[in-house]
Amino acid sequence: MSVSGWDDGPVSEPTFRYHPDPLASGSALRTDHVCSVCGMDRQIRYQGPVYGRQPDSLCLHCIHSGAASRALSVSAGGDKDSDMAAVFSDAVDVPDAMPLSVVEEITRRTPGFAGWQQEAWLYHCGDGAAFLGPVGYRELEAHPEALAMLRKDHQRYGWAPAETEQFLRRLDRAGEPTAYLFRCLHCNTSLASWDIG
């Protein structure tokens, strides 16, 4: 069943600055459902992490508007003013100078993504980067600057170059280890992080 606007046909899905295609990235699934927050019949269901109360079903509209973050908040004890808003990604390794408005848009009004351990959003050029999805080595070959970033990360941890190359060639979009591809919204640099179970 299609959700209709006043008289302008089906309601379009929201767009996200920091997560341009939640369907392609695997953070959303095309399926009919009733959203637990707004109660509307929807065709796209969010299937990423929720750090807060767990809904039975969640639509992208409620994430985009911030309604889901408010509705799924958890009590921090005490009065209602101490409730903690639900988030869809964790704010880890955020650069010190990052505006709070950017961090809040990414964590509270942008679909997150599931990882093996701790997902981390990437930042570049003083802004959040756009999450494009999980990738393996074959996909990363088209993004040499992202591969260079992963190599530098492994060097920082003391990995030998041969160990790093062996690890990178094992990256698998659908398995583990995996990498997560981002793109800078300002200079178009490809960025990547990695994760393993």
Image (tube, rainbow, N blue to C red):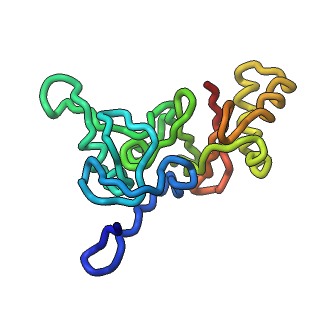
Query: What residue is at 75 percent from the left and 49 percent from the top?
Result: 143
Query: What residue is at 37 percent from the left and 38 percent from the top?
Result: 87
Classify residue 109 as left or right of residue 79: right
Residue 120 x/y as whole percent:
53, 35
Query: What residue is at 41 percent from the left and 42 percent from the top?
Result: 107
Residue furthest left in the image: 79
Q: Which quadrant holds the N terminus?
A: bottom left
Residue 70 lies in quadrant: top left
Classify residue 189 as left or right of residue 99: right
Q: In this view, does 175 lie above or below 189?
A: above
Classify residue 16 as left or right of residue 157: left
Residue furthest bottom in the image: 7
Residue 109 x/y as whole percent:
38, 49
Question: For this rendering, which residue is in front, 87 or 100?
Answer: 87
Residue 162 x/y as whole percent:
87, 25
Question: For this rendering, which residue is in front, 155 or 98?
Answer: 155
Question: For this rendering, which residue is in front, 99 or 191?
Answer: 191
Q: How many labels does the image show?
A: 0
Residue 127 x/y as whole percent:
51, 48
Q: Is residue 72 above or below residue 117?
A: below
